[in-house]
Amino acid sequence: MIALLKAPEVARGSNTRHSACEVFIMGSSSGKVLPEPSKNGCFSLINSVVNFRKQETDREKCDEKRQAWLWRRRRSGRRASREGVSEGVKELVHLDEERMRNPNAKFRAKFDPRVTARYDIKALIGCGSFSRVVRAEHRRSRQPFAIKLLEVKGREGHEACQAELGVLRRVNHSNVIRLAEVFETPHRVYLVLELATGGELLERMVARGTFRERDATKALKMVASGLCYLHSLGVIHRDLKPENLLYYHPGQDSRLIITDFGLACWDKTPASFQSKGDTSVSTHDTNCDSSLSAVDFEKSRQSKDWAVRTLCGTPEYLAPEMLAQRPCGSAVDMWALGVITYIVLSGSLPFDQSSRPRLFRAILRGSFSFHGDPWKSVSTLAKSFIGHLLTLEPEHRMTAEEALKHPWLVSMAACSSNKNLHRSISRNLQRRASRASSRCPSSGSTPGSRTSMRSGSWPGSGPQLQRQVTVCLKIAA
Ligand code: PIT
């Protein structure tokens, strides 16, 4: 039986969680992209790693002190200007007010001068508790990039960050976010990533006037392609959801990119050893067994409470083997792909119970249905695709390679229904969003959602969309 427990805050770098409701909310990373096309659309892999370990602690501390000093001066300055005090102080106040007028200055200050020497920080495009994503421009080439800033706290934070970096440094595929450069300091890591400006998967679906099965296959083929590549390397994403799928540019022909590797790890299940051989994965230190990261494992070991384990992910997308604490491999991503396909075709979730225990029971039973609108208009082939992904036993679940060979994807739904599903999908998405906001009106999202630009729903994006948040749960076995 699974019980959700309240537990103390667990720091883990980019994915640091805050206790809220019955779960820990993770400051998951990436952000909504403003629709600004890249100038030349090309991406060059710089692949350099800049490490300024030494003097950095001092520099960061110094920066923080300077900020605090400025803040104090601002307050005393305001008082001074009211009381007509010295010109010097007034100048400081002026500088500071300038900073207030320019909100970018606040997050710009978080960037190491060596980063800003190379990149012009343009705007904040995403924000989590311990990470921020900004749009930046390489000063010399004028090429646009996204820079993810990770606040790294303690040894655990470092380990988690290194795991994320380890994955990002290895990947190079058109449907997976590419890392260009890394700047490391003892307390911060700056990931320079390719800039995706085309918006998230559901956001784009809703923005269109039409959406047919063929459109769904186009998107899902790209996701399956990215997954096939990741799984061939032995990488498991573990937090696949529409919010982590970004279009590279706003055009119709844009590729779709898998982002956010904050929970990614290396596959160490026996099946992966058999297919890839020990050597390909043995050099990596992150353990995926029972869906516990090395850090989580260490935490639960230290807590001496072996009956309680931490599980990270987005509840609605968690595979049954994760909940059952069985060994988890790349099949967990395929389950998530099944959930995504279901949403893309209907605007609703296959497992959508209002309480987490009920939700988890439904997932463990694998009980979902194709009832309601618009399932009558959806082809049997599309339902077969979903059915092969939402299969309880991971060994029987379709792999990414098999998904790419499924007739629904291969034919691009040529023999499927040509009905426009857009209206039903938008209506279902909207219904879900308003249900969630009435449950938790302040956040506009599910109870306990993280406060970030990406949580809740997007203002001004037509129908309001509901986001599922990444959480860490303590589960009692
Ligand atoms: C973009 C635009 C954007 C977010 C991102 C990239 C974030 C990417 C990302 C986040 C991660 C990670 C790898 C990539 O591990 O809005 O171009 O946590």
Image (cartoon, rainbow, N blue to C red):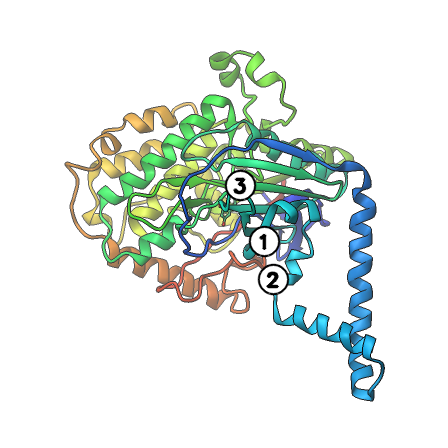
Q: Pointer 1: what residue?
A: 121
Establish if 250 lies above or below 456: above
Q: Which amino acid does label 2 sit on?
A: Asn
Q: What residue type is labelled 3?
A: Leu
- Does any portion of residue 167 appear in the rendered image? yes
Q: Pointer 2: what residue?
A: 104
CA separation, marks 1 and 3?
13 Å
Name the spot of residue 80 as percent of width and height, x first.
82, 82
Please identify, in this view, whether the residue under mark 1 or under mark 3 is nearer the observer: 1
Residue at 71% from the left image edge and 37% from the top image edge:
158
The answer to the question of whether label 2 and label 1 lie on touching residues, with beta carbons closer than 8 A, is yes
Name the spot of residue 42 as percent of width and height, x first.
42, 39
Residue at 66% from the left image edge and 39% from the top image edge:
183
Name the spot of residue 2 as percent of width and height, x first.
58, 42
Label 3: element kind = strand
Q: Looking at this view, is 300 or 333 the one in front?
A: 333
Establish if 351 lies above or below 70: above
